[in-house]
Amino acid sequence: MITLVCPHCGPRDATEFAYIGERTARPDPNDTTPQEWRGYLYLRSNPAGWADELWLHRAGCGRYLAVRRHRTTGAVDEVRDVGAGGEP
């Protein structure tokens, strides 16, 4: 079981949240090839270890949260609010 500490609502079970995905830098749409967009949208390396992820607190405050989570153990190192739109 994963517990995420929402900055607004406190500790909550991960079932209250929706996993949005890995946080990656969005490429500039004016300078990006279709292959680069495909890589940004669909391709992830998914290595074991720590990862920066985006979660939505859908059953709580409705805010997007940046979560640093270990993919093997499920340990959570950091949870930060990134705003209503999910962008930092």
Image (spheres, rainbow, N blue to C red):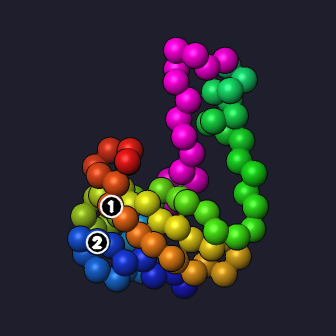
| Residue in view at x 67 percent, y 39 percent | 42
Residue 22 in magenta stretch: yes
What is the spatial separation of the Cα atoms under label 2 and label 1, in whole angstroms?
Answer: 7 Å
**Quarter residue 24 falls in:** top right
Magenta stretch: give its range: 18-33
Residue annotated with mark 1: 81
| Residue in view at x 76 percent, y 61 percent | 47
Q: Are marks 2 and 1 in contact (CB under 8 Å)?
A: yes
**Quarter residue 80 falls in:** bottom left
Query: For numbered disc 1, what is the local secondary structure?
Result: strand
First of labels 2, 1 by sequence position: 2
| Residue in view at x 54 percent, y 85 percent | 1
Of helix, strand and loop, which mostly describes the magenta segment?
loop
Q: Position of residue 75 (x, y in %)?
A: 57, 81
Q: Nearer the viewer, residue 17 or 54?
A: 54
Whether residue 81 is visible to the viewer of this picture, yes or no, is: yes
